[in-house]
Amino acid sequence: RPAGPSGAGTARGARGPRREGPPLQTPLSVLAAAPRDREAASRSSSPGQGAQDGGAAPGRPRTKFSAAQLRELERSFREQRYIGAGEKRRLAAALNLSQSQIKTWFQNRRMKFKRQTQDAR
């Protein structure tokens, strides 16, 4: 094995040579999320709560979809079970939801559809 930049052998393996340049900075989204993480951790550590007791994992609260949003999502699902990027953007804008919420809803709806069709057999 050839010697690294410092003259000594390295145990980097497949990672390749070390990158030179300015140090990496923590994104603002990570810094902004830190207080929420601490708050969620303190909630889940209290007695009688947490994922081990059957409660939801700490994090983002469950989205409550309105009846109008569900109607539009179901209509779109009936037309096509897998949503494309353009349709996802259109639905997200029309329903005032994020694209990841739309994607997750479609994933969950496909699983529900799969369970329903298996139960019917």
Image: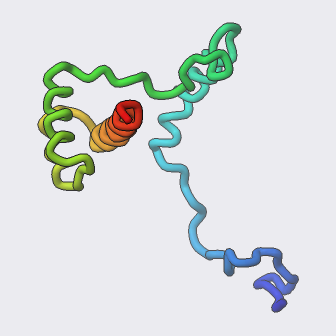
Residue drawn at (23%, 55%), measured in percent from left and top?
Answer: 85
- Number of marks: 0
Position of residue 108 measured from the top left corner of the image (x, y, whole percent): 37, 36
53 sits left or right of 87 in the view: right
Q: Which residue is most to the front?
A: 121
Scheme of image coloration? rainbow
Residue drawn at (31%, 20%), measured in percent from left and top?
Answer: 64
42 sits left or right of 85 in the view: right
7 sits left or right of 38 in the view: right
Q: Which residue is most to the top?
A: 48
Position of residue 88 measured from the top left corner of the image (x, y, whole percent): 21, 47
| Camera-side residue of 20 and 14 | 14
* Image position of 115 with respect to 27: above or below: above
Q: Quadrant of the C terminus?
A: top left
Position of residue 82 measured from the top left corner of the image (x, y, whole percent): 26, 50
Residue drawn at (28%, 43%), measured in percent from left and top?
Answer: 99
Query: Residue 112's quadrant in the figure?
Result: top left
* Image position of 52 with respect to 17: above or below: above
Q: Quadrant of the N terminus?
A: bottom right
Whether residue 104 appears in this view of the structure is no
Residue drawn at (54%, 21%), measured in percent from left and top?
Answer: 56
Whether residue 80 appears in this view of the structure is yes
